[in-house]
Image (cartoon, grey):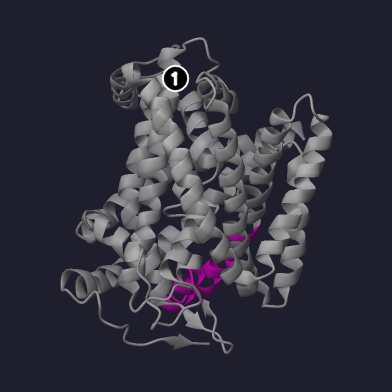
């Protein structure tokens, strides 16, 4: 196990080295420029996300699809992931994480557009789409589509299941310390969580969407308000925190005898890696549910999808990073070497509300992530093995919720990073090779003023 842990750390480090940073951030920047900066339409996109397009084909509303994708992305990456990036890459990682979100809006936009452009209707009226259909129908690369689905199905059990279930059980064991044995707490929380997840996902995308539409706005708003309160308490340190973040992001001095640029490399690597973990722009997961949206043309849903990255990283991750950095400055004695402990101590320094905010955020964010990712896994399994495989997938998924609540996850975290990267590669290939299609559709619907026009045709299985 120790050897396997070491091996996965090496593979994860290689995958998240300069090649992935260049590919990911390069795609974000390339699409931003090629699509003429769709980020400037973010407020129009937010307005569209609140409207219903009920006359159009689809399984759920545009907001329902957005809420489900946000449920899957707003998770431990927003809280523990940001702290981990800071502990490993320094405060500068917060800026790289934020920049990944700003430019990643264009990538999330492109993913959403392709999801609608190449989605297909099943004989029973369901809408299926995502990178696998863009790879197969847009590029004729069925083998890449299969590879993407395989990586997605595996990643689902890590990033979208056991990691989140473990975060919930660990926090509940701390909250119930003294009232119940920690191991017993984890067992009980695992059982309850598995039952709740099973109850929701058995109803398919409509059930998941209803729960996420109700849960996501409430939990995100409460968390943001709590963080703003903490920032108000730490107000005297906000200026220093911002200067530290910017200075650390571009610091050229070598540290510990390393070479010049080491600090930038570490900050960029962990900031971008955790940014992807958080907002999933470029990973290819969110367009799977975007394809189920009721929308009249690809660009409308592309705009709605792009707001997911805005809320997740540009807003929530930025606020979390600022909370952690101001707390480090205000309370230099806190443990900065471990991401989980850094988060706990940073929030815990705030009397009365700090710990409850953190506990509530982790539990609700993690639960919603499990729901969102269950849908991604279902669609990946359906593509690989047909609709009959879904019931077996659901059983395994629910059992792993319980298992994840009680197991050690050092290895799983490494595997989550590895499969995140492996998912991203075929998806980024489709985005780059189909960027001409994305640009053409954007020009017609968005820049030529045809945003209310209906899609010309619909593919059917």
Stretch of the chain drawn in magenta: 128-153
Residue 197: % across, % down? 69, 57
- Left or right position of 395 against 359: right
The prevailing secondary structure element of the residues shown in magenta is helix
- Left or right position of 41 against 24: left
What residue is at 34 percent from the left and 33 percent from the top? 95
Dot 1, crowdedness within 10 Å: few (<14), some or many (≥20)?
many
Residue 196: % across, % down? 71, 56
Q: Where 170 sits versus 88, above or below?
A: below
Q: Where 282 sits versus 101, above or below?
A: below
Query: In the rendered image, which quarter is residue 269 located in?
Result: top left
Q: In the depicted view, which residue is nearer to us: 56 or 127? A: 56
Indicate the quadrant containing the N terminus: top left, top right, bottom left or bottom right: top right
What residue is at 50 percent from the left and 66 percent from the top? 289
Residue 98: % across, % down? 35, 39
Query: In the rendered image, which quarter is residue 33 located in?
Result: bottom left
How many numbered discs sit on the rendered protein?
1
What residue is at 58 percent from the left and 51 percent from the top? 369
Please tell me whether mark 1 sits on a helix, a strand or a loop: helix
Q: Residue furthest top?
A: 333
Is 280 in the magenta? no
Residue tagged 1? 327
Residue 144 visible within the image: yes
């Amino acid at each position: 196990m120790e050897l396997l842990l070491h091996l996965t750390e090496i593979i994860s480090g290689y995958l998240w080295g300069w090649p992935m940073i260049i590919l990911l951030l390069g795609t974000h920047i390339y699409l931003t420029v090629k699509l003429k900066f769709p980020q400037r339409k973010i407020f129009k996109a937010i307005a569209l996300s609140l409207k219903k397009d009920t006359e159009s084909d689809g399984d759920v509303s545009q907001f329902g699809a957005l809420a489900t994708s946000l449920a899957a992305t707003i998770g431990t990456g927003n809280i523990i992931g940001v702290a981990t990036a800071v502990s490993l890459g320094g405060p500068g990682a917060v800026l790289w994480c934020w920049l990944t979100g700003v430019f990643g809006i264009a990538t999330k936009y492109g993913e959403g557009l392709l999801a609608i452009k190449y989605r297909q209707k099943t004989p029973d009226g369901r809408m299926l789409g995502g990178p696998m259909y863009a790879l197969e129908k847009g590029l004729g690369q069925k083998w890449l589509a299969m590879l993407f689905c395989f990586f997605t199905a595996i990643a689902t059990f890590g990033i979208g299941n056991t990691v989140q279930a473990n975060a919930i059980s660990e926090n509940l064991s701390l909250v119930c310390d003294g009232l119940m044995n920690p191991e017993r707490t984890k067992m009980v929380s695992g059982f309850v969580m598995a039952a709740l997840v099973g109850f929701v996902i058995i109803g398919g995308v409509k059930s998941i969407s209803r729960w996420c539409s109700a849960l996501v706005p409430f939990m995100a708003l409460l968390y943001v308000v709590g963080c703003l309160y903490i920032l108000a308490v730490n107000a005297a340190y906000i200026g220093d925190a911002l200067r530290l973040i910017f200075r650390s992001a571009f610091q050229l001095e070598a540290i510990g005898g390393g070479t010049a640029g080491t600090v930038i490399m570490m900050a960029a690597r962990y900031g971008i890696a955790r940014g992807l973990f958080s907002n999933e722009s470029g990973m290819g997961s969110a367009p799977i549910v975007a394809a189920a949206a009721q929308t009249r043309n690809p660009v409308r849903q592309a705009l709605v999808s792009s707001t997911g990255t805005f809320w997740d990283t540009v807003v929530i991750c930025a606020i979390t990073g600022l909370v952690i950095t101001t707390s480090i400055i205000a309370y230099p004695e806190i443990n900065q070497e471990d991401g989980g402990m850094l988060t706990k101590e940073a929030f815990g320094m705030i009397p009365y509300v700090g710990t409850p905010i953190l506990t509530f955020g982790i539990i609700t964010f993690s639960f919603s992530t499990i729901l969102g990712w269950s849908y991604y896994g279902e669609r990946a399994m359906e593509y690989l093995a047909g609709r009959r495989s879904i019931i077996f997938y659901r059983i395994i998924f629910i059992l792993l919720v319980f298992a994840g609540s009680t197991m050690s996850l050092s290895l799983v975290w490494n595997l989550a990073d590895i499969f995140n990267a492996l998912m991203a590669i075929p998806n980024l290939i489709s985005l780059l090779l189909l960027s001409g299609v994305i640009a053409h559709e954007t020009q017609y619907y968005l820049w030529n003023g045809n945003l209310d026009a209906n899609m010309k045709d619909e593919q059917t299985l």
